[in-house]
């Protein structure tokens, strides 16, 4: 689901930029591994490394030891994994030092440092939806960059 | 639920760039708003 989330952000990136925002993606990997992973995934925005989970913890994204069992009990999880597998994104076990229990999250933060939007995943397939992301971007009163236009 | 809510100040935590340099998250939202995405593991 990590790769699915990245793919979603890559897809949405032109709209995000047009709305006057950028993206920073935080990973559990060490800095060098994060750089390699993001290059492999053709990530066009900044990737950051948080192997000690200081930022994950500060943003309330706790690693839940029951997350795998809880997620496995949801049909939506299997549907999401099947959808990703059909795209060639087979789920792999986490690399050493990265917990499978860690859930993802997405926040929109304005340039004053205020949280404008927050989504904390409740299970592994619970990513921000394209519609929610589009609505969150549209609700921000941010002037698009010169020459850019909103697609919505 | 812990962590910031909408309207709260976002925690300005130190993380690392891909070169291993310590950086503040605020360095990335100071010039423009950002989508701050936290990923699961690389698998």
Image (cartoon, rainbow, N blue to C red):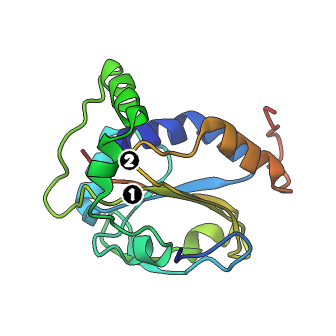
Q: Is residue B17 above or below residue A57?
A: above
Q: Residue furthest front?
A: A73
Q: Quadrant of the N terminus of chain A?
A: top left
Instruction: Name the spot of residue A43 as percent of width and height, x first.
Output: 43, 43
Name the residue nearer the viewer: A122 or A4.
A122
Instruction: Name the spot of residue A75 as percent of width and height, x first.
Output: 39, 32
Q: Residue furthest left?
A: A96
Q: Quadrant of the C terminus of chain A?
A: top right
Q: Which residue is painted at 38% across and 36% down in the image?
A: A77
Q: Which residue is painted at 50% across and 72% down in the image?
A: A59
Give the mark, 1 or 2, whose residue is nearer the N terminus. 1
State which quadrant residue A3 falls in: top left
Local packing at callout 2 (Cα closer than 10 Å; few below 14, some 14-19, many 20+) is: many
Q: Which mark is residue A124?
A: 2
Q: Is residue A49 above or below residue A72?
A: below
- Element under label 2? loop
Local packing at callout 1 (Cα closer than 10 Å; few below 14, some 14-19, many 20+) is: many
Q: Which mark is residue A103?
A: 1
- Is there CB contact under 8 Å for labels 1 and 2? yes
How many numbered circles does the render carry? 2
Estimate the spatial distance between the alpha carbons at disc 1 and disc 2, rounded to whole Å.
6 Å
């Amino acid at each position: 689901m990590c790769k699915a989330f990245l793919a979603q952000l890559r897809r949405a990136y032109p709209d995000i930029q047009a709305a006057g925002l950028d993206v920073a993606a935080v990973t559990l990997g060490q800095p060098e591994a994060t750089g390699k992973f993001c290059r492999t995934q053709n990530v066009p925005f900044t990737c950051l490394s948080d192997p000690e989970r200081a930022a994950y913890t500060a943003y309330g994204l706790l690693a839940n030891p029951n997350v795998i069992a809880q997620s496995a009990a949801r049909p939506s999880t299997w549907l999401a994994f099947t959808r990703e597998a059909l795209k060639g994104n087979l789920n792999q076990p986490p690399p050493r030092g990265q917990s499978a229990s860690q859930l993802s999250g997405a926040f929109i933060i304005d340039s004053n440092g205020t949280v404008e939007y927050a989504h904390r995943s409740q299970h592994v397939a619970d990513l921000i939806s394209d519609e929610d992301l589009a609505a969150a971007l549209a609700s921000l009163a941010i002037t698009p960059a010169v020459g850019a236009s909103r697609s919505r | 639920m812990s962590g910031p809510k909408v309207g709260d100040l976002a925690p300005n935590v130190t993380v690392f760039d891909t070169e291993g340099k310590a950086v503040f998250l605020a360095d990335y939202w100071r010039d423009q708003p950002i989508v701050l995405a936290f990923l699961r593991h690389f698998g």
